[in-house]
Image (tube, rainbow, N blue to C red):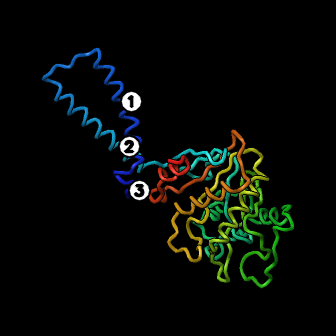
Amino acid sequence: MTKVSFFDRRIGGNFLKITSVISTTLSLVVLFVDIPTKQKHTFGWVFLGLLALIYLVIWVWSNKLNKIDINVEGSDVTIKVGDIFQQQGLKAIAFNEYFDTQVDNNVIAEKSLNGIFIKKYLDTDVPDLDRYIESYAFDTSEILDSSPNRKLGKKIRYQIGTICVYKDYLLTAFSKFDENNRAQLTMPEYLEFLINFWDKVNNVYGQQDVSTPIFGSGITRIKGHKRISDEDLLKIMLWTFRISEMRFKYPARLTILIHKDKIEKINLLDIKSARNGV
């Protein structure tokens, strides 16, 4: 899949920067080296071929780009392909608004990040995690109400964006559940989650690195936005981070992880250029 056009102006800009250095170097060289007249045409064609190859390499690199470093309002941010469980520092795992831990493909899907965390990376029994969450010192404003008639899962409902710090994980209430335990959000709710999440991170990160997935990528349904892409979600995350009060103090940084199967649909050159004002 081609994400960046062959004639994209940013490719042209990078190409001109490289060729200007090459041209300046060659200009200095020919001041001291005479090129035989018979070989000038050959050298000319070789030079043009080299330029074409350089342009092609820049275009391929732009389409294969899988990591960028940007600065958002003074905070260092890395966006890259990777496994969130292999990152240093705090790792955000999205739960639903009940902090459910029942991985049975009815409440929590086994292949979701939430399910993988519980099934593979949780270093204790699930009941122990449940007790930890129940006894966690949430703010009273973060506990919304109880749903005693809920047939599957827990009963206590939390404000989206609420964080429970468990060892080096930030368990966060992300998705709302309907009566059929299907995760979904409206766009205003998605924005509410992100703004709350960044503000909560600001209170708990303790100058540690923080890694997050692209929130909303995968099974969560955003009402009224059936075709919203992972790239759109990533841009929304960066926008809400920029307008929030969250700022990472050096050397701490934010890392947003992209699943390896999703990178072909995300134009990181576009995001990097937008952040740099190109």
Q: Residue at label 1?
A: 21
Q: Residue at label 2?
A: 58
Q: Are marks 3 and 2 in contact (CB under 8 Å)?
A: no
Q: Amino acid at mark 1?
A: Val
Q: Write the residue at 34% across / 51% down.
A: 6
Query: Which quadrant would residue 166 be assigned to in this image?
Result: bottom right
Instruction: Give the image location of residue 214, x and y in percent.
Output: 59, 59
Quick one: which residue is furthest to the left in this view?
A: 38
Q: Amino acid at mark 2?
A: Ile
Q: Amino acid at mark 3?
A: Lys
Image side of residue 38 versus residue 140, left or right = left
Image side of residue 13 versus residue 130, left or right = left
- Residue 124 visible? The answer is yes
Instruction: Give the image location of residue 209, x and y in percent.
Output: 69, 46
Of residues 149 and 238, the one drawn nearer to the viewer in this rendering = 238
Q: Residue at label 3?
A: 3
Q: Write the residue at 81% across / 62% down.
A: 132
In the drawing, what numbered circle is on residue 179?
none
Of residues 199 and 210, the one drawn nearer to the viewer in this rendering = 199
